[in-house]
C-alpha cells in the first residue's frame, strides 16, 4: 500500500508504515540516514543530485515519520525494510547508500541480499563495533549503565545545541523520543556486526566515504573497511566530522557520489 503524505509518501513494509521522499528522475539512489535522525538529513546533498538522479530518502522504522509496531530495532530489520522498499517500488538494482547507521544498514543489505543493489555508498560506518571501539563510544554517548539502560538527560547534554533539532525530526510526543532512544540503545549495544568473511563476500562495487575529522569513526577504520571490501573505492571528505551531509560539505559529497554513481551505470 502506497499513500501520499504531504511532500512524501508512505509504504507498508514488513508491518511498518515507512515514510519516504521520492524526488527527481533518472537512475535511482536510496540514501539512508544516521541513528536518531531522519531522511531529511540528506536534503543538502539531495538538492544537488535530483537534476540527474531519482533520489529516495526513507525515514527508517521508528524514526522521523515512520512507525515501528515491532517494538525493536536492528540493522538487519531496517535493511530488510530497504529491500522491501526496493521491491515495492520496482527499482532495478538501485544505488544504495547511507551515513553512520545508514552505512551499517547498507552493508547489512549487501550481505543479506547481494543482488538488490547495483552499487553501495558506505559513509562513516564500520561493521565490527567491538574491534572498532564503537560499542563503548555508543555506550558513552548514551550514558548507558551496565545493563545498557540509556540516560536521556545525559544524552541531551551530549547532543548539546543539536538536541532540539534532532528531536524535531521525529513525530509524536516525548515518549516517542524516549522509545526511540531505548530501542536504539539495544541496537547499538547488541549489534553482532559483519565479520571479514562476510565483507569479502560482498561483490557489489562500493564507495567508502569518510570524514577526516570524524570523532566516532577514525580514518584508519574507514581505510580498513575499504581494504576488506573486494570492489571498493575510498573518498575522504576534508573538514567533515561524524555529523555527515552538512550544508557546508554537501557540494563535495554530491560531487563524489555523482562521479561514483555515473561510473556504475
Image (spheres, rainbow, N blue to C red):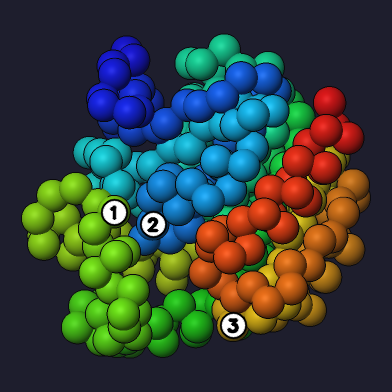
Cβ atoms under marks 1 and 3 closer than 8 Å: no
Task: Say the numbered circle drawn on residue 169.
Answer: 1
- Residue at horizontal 34%, vertical 33%? 19
Q: Badges 2 and 1: C-beta atoms under 8 Å apart?
A: yes
Q: Whole-percent x and y of residue 128?
A: 65, 68
Mark 3 crowdedness (10 Å alpha carbons): few <14, some 14-19, many ≥20: few
Tell me the element at label 3: loop
Closest to the observer, 254 or 219: 254
Quadrant in the rendering for residue 149: bottom left
- Residue that mark 2 sits on: 37
127 with respect to 66 (left or right): right
User: 120 or 55: which is nearer to us?
Assistant: 55
Lower position in the chain sequence, tag 3 or tag 2: 2
* Residue 33, image x, y percentages: 48, 51
Inter-mark Cα distance, 3 to 2: 18 Å
Kindly tell me whether residue 142 is visible in this rendering: no
* Lower sequence index among marks 2 and 1: 2
> What is the quadrant of residue 7 in the picture?
top left
At x 64% / y 37%, what residue is drawn? 49
Residue 263 coordinates in the image, percent (x, y): 88, 35
Tell me the residue at 56%/72% (across/down): 242
Amino acid at each position: 500500500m502506497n499513500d501520499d503524505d504531504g511532500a512524501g509518501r508512505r509504504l507498508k513494509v514488513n508491518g511498518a508504515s515507512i515514510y519516504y521522499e521520492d524526488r527527481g528522475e533518472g537512475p535511482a539512489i536510496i540514501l539512508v540516514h544516521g541513528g536518531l535522525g531522519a531522511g531529511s538529513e540528506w536534503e543538502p546533498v539531495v538538492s544537488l543530485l535530483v537534476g540527474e538522479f531519482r533520489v529516495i530518502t526513507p525515514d527508517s522504522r521508528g524514526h522521523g515519520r515512520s512507525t515501528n509496531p515491532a517494538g525493536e530495532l536492528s540493522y538487519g530489520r531496517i535493511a530488510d525494510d530497504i529491500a522491501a522498499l526496493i521491491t515495492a517500488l520496482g527499482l532495478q538494482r538501485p544505488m544504495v547508500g547511507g551515513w553512520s547507521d545508514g552505512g551499517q544498514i547498507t552493508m547489512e543489505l549487501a550481505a543479506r541480499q547481494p543482488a538488490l543493489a547495483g552499487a553501495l555508498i558506505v559513509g562513516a560506518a564500520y561493521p565490527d563495533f567491538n574491534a572498532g571501539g564503537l560499542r563503548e563510544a555508543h555506550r558513552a554517548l548514551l550514558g548507558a549503565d551496565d545493563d545498557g539502560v540509556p540516560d536521556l538527560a545525559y544524552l541531551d547534554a551530549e547532543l548539546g545545541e543539536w538536541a532540539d533539532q534532532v528531536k524535531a525530526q521525529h513525530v509524536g510526543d516525548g515518549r516517542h523520543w524516549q522509545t526511540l532512544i531505548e530501542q536504539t540503545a539495544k541496537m547499538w549495544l547488541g549489534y553482532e556486526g559483519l565479520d571479514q568473511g562476510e565483507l569479502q563476500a560482498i561483490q557489489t562495487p562500493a564507495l567508502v566515504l569518510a570524514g577526516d575529522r570524524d570523532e566516532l569513526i577514525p580514518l584508519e577504520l574507514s581505510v580498513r573497511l575499504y581494504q576488506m571490501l573486494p570492489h571498493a573505492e575510498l573518498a575522504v571528505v576534508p573538514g567533515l566530522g561524524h555529523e555527515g551531509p552538512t550544508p557546508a560539505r554537501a557540494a563535495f559529497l554530491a560531487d563524489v557520489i555523482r562521479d561514483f554513481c555515473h561510473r556504475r551505470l
